[in-house]
Image (cartoon, grey):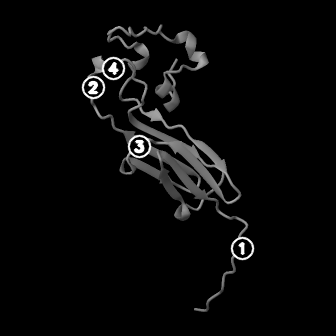
Amino acid sequence: MAKEKKSFFERLTGTVRMEEEAETKPVKKAAVSGGSDLGTWMEEETDQEGELTVDVYQTPEMIIIKSMIAGVRPEDLDISITRDMITIRGKREEERIARDDDYFTRELYWGSFSRTISLPEEIDVEEAEAIEKHGLLILKLPKLDKKRLSKLKVKTA
């Protein structure tokens, strides 16, 4: 059976989906008295990309997407949008201050992440807006007004 990609939250917290619980290996406990064995739950593959967690909701005029991106520089974010889909990619760089053996707990997620969201309605790509405020990414995506009526004038050639 193919192993399903873990979500950003699962990688962040070390949680396991209920259906996978029976298949997981036993977790080794970290010894607080100076032991360096931090357990198998922290020994993730480093080439795996995390999945960004998001809130997506709508107002009458727009679709709003919010996501926590604390620790990510704006230039390390790549947001691609079409009228019906958005992809957020980025990378959270770890600043190495301590050696691996000196950690008691390592729960923060470092590395690449992405998330592709199919939008429930078409949006106006030109009017979309991305704001970062205190580590929270807010995307404001104005809905296309399909009921808007425009008059087209006929020109003579």
Query: Which picture quadrant has residue 124?
Result: bottom right
User: Whole-Å distance between the Cαs marked 1 and 4?
Assistant: 62 Å
Write down the residue under mark 1. Answer: 149
- Which SS class for mark 3? strand
Could you give the CA–CA distance between mark 4 and mark 2, rounded to whole angstroms?
Answer: 7 Å
From the viewer's perspective, is the residue at label 4 or at label 3 nearer?
4
Left or right placement of residue 58 versus residue 115 in this view: right
Location of mark 4 (residue): 103
Return the disc, 2 or 1, that comes first in the chain's sequence.
Answer: 2
Give the Cα separation between the discs numbered 2 and 1: 62 Å
Task: Tell me the CA gap for discs 4 and 3.
Answer: 25 Å
- Looking at the picture, tell me which residue is in the foreground, 45 or 134: 134
Which label lies toward us, 3 or 1?
3
Instruction: Name the N-terminal-most of marks 4 and 3.
Output: 3
**Residue identifier under label 2:** 98
Q: Residue at x 64, y 59 (%)?
A: 143
**Left-right relation of 78 to 19:** left
Residue at the bottom extreme?
156
